[in-house]
């Protein structure tokens, strides 16, 4: 079944560019050079405005999702990583629901799966760009030439972002482009949320730290305004929530079960760790992509149609949600429908205003994180079967058990699926509570960034060890 479905995409793969893996393994310094080079290029795209864009044109459909999507309004990185992550989400759902079955141990089927996912990324790029333009994100009075100009820029820039992500994942860089871009975007938002000097409606700086000290110097009556502020303006409570989330993730990330292993020939003892957060931040990325697309579609429908429209139009607007402006700002947020339940309340004030929406968001975040975490281990080569093969290929074995893949897999089944479920649930709980407290860069963004930075630390350590002792490269999962 998988072959028929995936083969449908094969004729189109010849029209896509493919980055070939390097002929030989690059050195750690070379990978570092490629990684920082691509990061600098992405930062440039975040700051290069689209030709013809005016800040007064239209509303921002991704207003609350910018940090997570690693995007910036009105720039070449307008769509960010949205199309890539959405395509991955679609295939995760297809595999997880058994609509398609893929044998990831089969190189041919795995190549077909990867190629099909790339085609889907391109289709999502075209869809989001068209929906963005036709939905009025750049204004309602655009002529055909203006729409075409925006479309060409968005598609070209989105394709470049896809290629940058592929360059890193094919072995030229470290980690993945998606993780790198998210961490950079959220880090910028944290710094901006702490030290932004732009004044708010009370005359205090928008940066939480600057506003706090400014309020102490100016008038003690304004101190509370800097500690807890209305809307999405950063405050001290959000800063404290950010610090708490950082600390909790770092602590929980150290919780693991260590399985004793040893080299089959030299009997050298070692331990293979299975972390409590086994799938790290991947479940939150996938859930955030799902929520962002619901948010995006709801905003576009509300801009084009009205809930009072007859027939399917009114139904769709009511189902996905109607929108209203946030205070005195030009931005808006969903006030009902599906989008309101998949958009995190920002700070205690919005939780009090919308308690049922907050509870529903919490439940959805936790359950979906657990489900996506469990699905991910099969599609990403992290299942018990894959780990058993990895250990045996590295000439390692579990003391007291025969070097048989099925036996090792059955032993690992005691731990890996459970770690995937529990880790996914916990990461969902932490992300939701951080969002509720108004963490800088959004709670989900903070969670992702901490996990990504920790991953990069481990990647750096593994790469350096593999260069020093090449024989350990296979055991560390580093391709030669």
Image: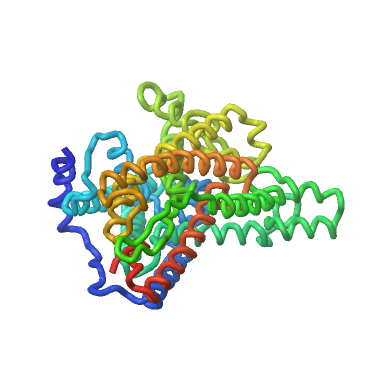
Measured as percent of width and height from the top left, residue 314 is found at 41, 25
Q: Can see residue 167?
A: no
* Residue 182 placement, left or right of 472: right
Q: Is residue 231 left or right of residue 32?
A: right
Q: Residue furthest top?
A: 310
Count up the numbered dots: 0
Quarter of the rendering occupied by the C terminus: bottom left
Residue 77 percent across, percent down from the top left = 42, 59
* Residue at the (85%, 60%) spot, across then down: 217
Q: Nearer the viewer, residue 10 or 96?
A: 96
Query: What residue lies at 40% left-to-right and 24% top-to-bottom?
Result: 315
- On the rendered image, what quadrant is the N terminus found in? top left
Q: Is residue 373 left or right of residue 123?
A: right
Q: Position of residue 153 (x, y in %)?
A: 35, 60
Q: Residue at x 45, y 26 (%)?
A: 318
Q: Is residue 29 left or right of residue 406?
A: right
Give the answer, above or below, for where 465 lies relative to 263. Answer: below
Picture coordinates of residue 329, whole percent (x, y): 61, 45
Q: How is the image coloured?
A: rainbow
Taking depth in this image into account, of 474 and 420 the one nearest to the observer is: 474
In this rendering, the answer to whether 339 lies above or below 125 is: above
Q: Is residue 286 visible?
A: yes
User: Which quadrant of the view contains residue 473?
Assistant: bottom left
Camera-side residue: 181 or 413?
413
Q: Residue furthest right?
A: 220
Q: Nearer the viewer, residue 138 or 37?
A: 37
Q: Relative to 169, does residue 417 appear above or below in the rendering? A: above
Residue at (36%, 45%) from the top-left corner? 412
């Amino acid at each position: 079944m998988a072959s028929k479905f995936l083969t449908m995409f094969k004729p189109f793969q010849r029209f896509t560019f493919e980055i070939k893996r390097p002929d030989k393994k690059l050195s750690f310094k070379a990978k570092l050079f490629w990684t920082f080079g691509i990061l600098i290029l992405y930062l440039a795209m975040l700051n290069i405005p689209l030709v013809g864009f005016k800040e007064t044109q239209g509303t921002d459909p991704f207003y609350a999702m910018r940090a997570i999507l690693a995007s910036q309004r009105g720039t070449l990185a307008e769509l960010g990583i949205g199309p890539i992550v959405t395509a991955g989400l679609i295939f995760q759902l297809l595999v997880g629901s058994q609509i398609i079955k893929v044998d990831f141990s089969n190189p041919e089927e795995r190549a077909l799966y990867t190629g099909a996912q790339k085609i889907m990324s391109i289709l999502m790029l075209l869809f989001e760009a068209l929906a963005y333009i036709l939905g009025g994100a750049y204004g309602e009075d655009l002529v055909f030439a203006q729409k075409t100009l925006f479309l060409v820029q968005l598609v070209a820039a989105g394709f470049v972002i896809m290629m940058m992500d592929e360059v890193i994942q094919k072995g030229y860089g470290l980690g993945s482009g998606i993780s790198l871009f998210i961490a950079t975007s959220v880090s910028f938002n944290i710094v901006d949320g702490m030290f932004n000097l732009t004044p708010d409606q009370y005359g205090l700086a928008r940066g939480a730290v600057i506003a706090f000290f400014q309020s102490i110097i100016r008038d003690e009556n304004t101190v509370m305004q800097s500690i807890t502020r209305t809307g999405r303006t950063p405050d001290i409570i959000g800063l404290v929530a950010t610090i708490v989330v950082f600390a909790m993730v770092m602590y929980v990330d150290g919780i693991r079960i260590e399985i004793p292993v040893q080299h089959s020939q030299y009997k050298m003892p070692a331990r293979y760790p299975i972390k409590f957060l086994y799938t790290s931040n991947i479940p939150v990325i996938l859930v955030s992509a799902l929520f962002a697309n619901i948010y995006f579609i709801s905003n576009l429908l509300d801009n084009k149609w009205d809930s009072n429209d007859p027939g399917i139009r009114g139904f769709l607007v009511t189902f996905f949600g109607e929108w209203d402006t946030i205070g005195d700002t030009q931005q808006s947020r969903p006030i009902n429908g599906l989008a309101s339940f998949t958009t995190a309340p920002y700070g205690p004030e919005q939780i009090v205003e919308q308690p049922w929406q907050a509870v529903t968001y919490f439940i959805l975040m936790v359950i979906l994180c657990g489900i996506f975490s469990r699905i991910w281990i099969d599609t990403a080569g992290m299942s018990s079967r894959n780990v058993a093969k990895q250990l045996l290929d590295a000439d390692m074995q579990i003391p007291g058990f025969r070097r048989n893949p099925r036996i090792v897999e059955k032993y690992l089944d005691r731990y890996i699926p459970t770690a995937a479920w529990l880790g996914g649930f916990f990461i969902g709980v932490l992300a939701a509570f951080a969002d509720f407290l108004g963490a800088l860069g959004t709670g989900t963004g903070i969670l992702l960034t901490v996990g990504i930075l920790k991953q990069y630390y481990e990647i750096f350590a593994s790469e350096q060890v593999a260069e020093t002792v090449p024989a350990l490269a296979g055991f560390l999962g580093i391709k030669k």
